[in-house]
Image (cartoon, rainbow, N blue to C red):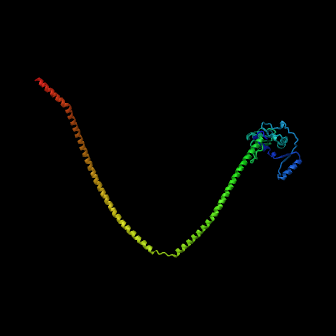
Amino acid sequence: QLASESWSVAVDCACGGLLDAFIVSCHKDLQVLRECAGRVYYNNLRIIVYDFTRQRLIIPDGSLPTTEHPTVLSVIQSENHTVLNVLVDQGHAERQVLVRDYEVGKSVAFDHRMRNIKEVYTSDGFRMFSRGSVQTILPPNKRPRPERWCSSPAEKIAELKNEADDIQRTISEKNAQRRKLVNDRSNLEQKIANLKRKREPEERHLMNKKVQLEDAKRATAENNRHAAVDTTELEEDIKEEKNNIEQKELSLQKTNVKLSAALREVNDRRMAFKTFMDSVNEERLHFSSANDELDLVKRKIDAAQQEKTHYEGVMTTKVLPDIKTAEAEYADLQQRRQ
């Protein structure tokens, strides 16, 4: 397993070929394993012969890359020393440096010229190395293999089991849908077969009708060919109708002439009536103005009469009593003087 899953692509690119290899302890085991592979037609099996009793290799510090970046060997965690030894001996995992991105990889691989660096791998799969003055950068594989490295195999197994369960549920749902579609298809095919059976007598009936129609058409054509139609009487009727139409058109023209004369006479009388009405309206205006003057005079007379009545009332109610009183006093004074 890996110390961090972020290096899974880089580690797989660095030593992915060794992951497909088998490790055996002797040549006899190699032959047995190759024979077993041949029985199942797996002929390109890679087998590595290695001493299982050998302890884990101790790499001197002077043989390690002088960089702070991790190596493939430092991120792989395994309890099997043989696997780690094979990665060192066969894949030089201790000299394969891992970096985060492309720019850092170029700096480590080409700029600083560090010792003991065989190759530099980025986290997304770029491979960089230099041989003398030649600098090489290889892009990631266009068809990468599924990731085989993880930091926790138990979690990875559980995740794969969940994915398998999801796939199984999807398969079950699709199978149910498929069965439903098959049933629907069977029902439709049954309906189509029933409709076809019902259609056959209708088609026969239609064909009989078509045959009868063709026979009727042929009989009608034969009758029309033998029957001679006399159109003389019809032509005379048409000529008579044309004469009647011409006479009616002539009468209509005469009527239109009389109507035009009558319309002119009506217009003349209408103009005379309009002139008469205009003169009447003028006289009415004169009478209206005279009536207005008469009404004004009447209103003035009424006003004078009302004023006269008012003064007479004043004389009767106020002036005459005072005069009579004065006369009485005067008469009284005359009597007293005598």
- Outermost residue, top direction? 337
Q: Residue at x 62, y 64 (%)?
A: 199
- The image position of residue 320, as x and y in percent, is 18, 31
Q: Looking at the image, which is closer to me, 227 or 76?
A: 227
Q: Is residue 67 above or below residue 253?
A: above
Residue 237 appears at what percent x and percent y?
42, 72
Residue that protrudes farthest toward the left in the picture: 338
Quarter of the C terminus within the rendering: top left
Residue, x 77% and y 41% (percent of image)? 154
Quarter the N terminus occupies:
top right
Residue 147: name its quadrant: top right
Position of residue 153 in the picture relative to residue 55 (left or right): left
Q: Nearer the viewer, residue 178 or 236?
A: 178
Left or right of residue 65: residue 285: left
Question: Is residue 133 something that shows in the picture?
Answer: no
On screen, residue 275 above or below 332: below
The image quarter containing residue 217 is: bottom right
Label count reads 0
Q: Can residue 328 be spotted in the picture?
A: yes
Q: Position of residue 250 (x, y in %)?
A: 37, 67
Q: Residue 162 in the image: x percent, y percent?
A: 74, 44
Residue found 38% across the figure and 68% down from its top: 248
Answer with the quarter of the image where residue 25 lies: top right
Judge whether 193 appears above or below 62 on screen: below
